[in-house]
Image: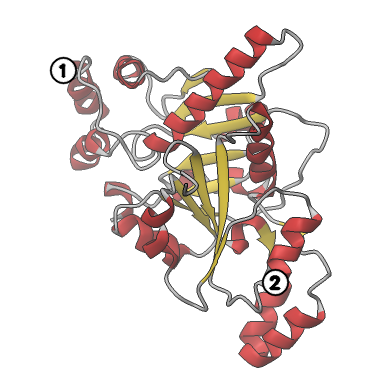
Amino acid sequence: MPYDLTSRLVVGLASSALFDLSESDEVFRTKGEQEYRKYQRKNENIPLRKGVAFPLIRRLLSLNKLNPDDPPVEVILVSRNDPDTGMRVMSSIEHYNLGMTRAVFLQGGLPYKYIPAFDIELFLSANPTDVKQAMMSGYPAGEILSGNIEDDLNDSELRIAFDFDGVLADDEAEEVYQATGNLLDFHEHEEKKVDIAHNPGPLKNFLQRISDIQKLEIEQAEKDPSYRPVLKVSIVTARNAPSHKRVINTMRSWGIMVNEAFFMGGVDKFNVLEVINPHIFFDDQKIHLESSSKVLPSVHIPFGVTNR
């Protein structure tokens, strides 16, 4: 029988998100494709340095120990390299024992076309054009922003943080605020619709899969009291009371419980992100990522009215 991806959390990952490709990209830009090919072959067995998404991916894949016979997580490399130049990426994956076995090499082709073929709930890339093409086609994608990120091997938790509007939910409420610029109008709109769940945003299905894995962790902890769940999910949003109610009611309607929620009311999100120290933070506005991306893995979701 074919290997079924529909019941798993599937992440599609460009090599630019997983590894630091600055040196090899410089060769390609300055010396051309043939010299790039020679360079990659020469360094094929020299592992690439870890990239911004590496800490997230390593921890996601470690969750497969919950059910090794039916692993809940699948990470698929979706690369613009051809199979020849992509050998170094695959060798690096093997070097770090990441447990990624499936890969797509496109020789400069468009990655977004293959997102539905693999039931991908999140495509991550450092290439903003690839990410925007995916989003314009209705697929969930995020641009990994460059930063000085360290992978703390002694930290066993996996902390994921989300903005709400334009990320987990659609941009309906954000459109109201952008149209008037009046916070009172925004709160009035949300109070009127407090019991009406938001429509899903681009990463709702990704969060749903994360929530499903959290439930597996709870089951494991019930069977084995020594097991400590590692997944921790936070919402960090510019909303504050009274518009917080619709967020909570929406999560209830989706059957999703998050561990933490921060209703910041305009306070700089970085103040709490420094404390949370997430392995990934998703926001639809780059201005909210300017501080965090320097020291925390940060992803821009180019969705909705704020990105038009």
Would residue 279 be found to the left or right of residue 181 on screen?
A: right
Quadrant into which the C terminus falls: bottom left
The answer to whether residue 220 is seen in the rendering is yes
Residue 300 picture location, percent across and down: 47, 50
- Residue furthest to the left in view is 192
Please tell me how crowded label 1 is: few (under 14), some (14-19), or many (20+) other residues with Cα within 10 Å. Answer: few
- In the image, residue 18 above or below residue 197: below
Task: Pick the residue in front: 182 or 65.
Answer: 65
Q: Secondary structure at mark 1?
A: helix
Instruction: Give residue 249's quadrant in the image.
Output: top left
Instruction: Give residue 103's quadrant in the image.
Output: bottom right
Q: Which residue is rendered at x = 54% and y = 39% of the image?
A: 281
Q: Identify the disc placed on residue 283.
A: none
- In the image, residue 292 above or below residue 156: below
Q: Identify the disc placed on residue 192.
A: 1
Please tell me how crowded label 2 is: few (under 14), some (14-19), or many (20+) other residues with Cα within 10 Å. Answer: some
Task: Pick the residue in front: 166 or 64.
Answer: 64
Pair 1/2: label in front: 2
Task: Pick the residue in front: 138 or 181.
Answer: 138
- Given the image, on which type of amino acid does mark 2 rest? Met
Residue 261 picture location, percent across and down: 48, 20
Q: Mark 2 = which residue?
A: 87
- Given the image, on which type of amino acid does mark 1 rest? Lys
Mark 1 or 2, nearer chain start: 2
Residue 34 picture location, percent across and down: 66, 92
Residue 252 picture location, percent across and down: 34, 15
Q: CA distance from mark 1 to mark 2?
A: 55 Å
Instruction: Give residue 257's quadrant in the image.
Output: top left
Q: Secondary structure at mark 2?
A: helix
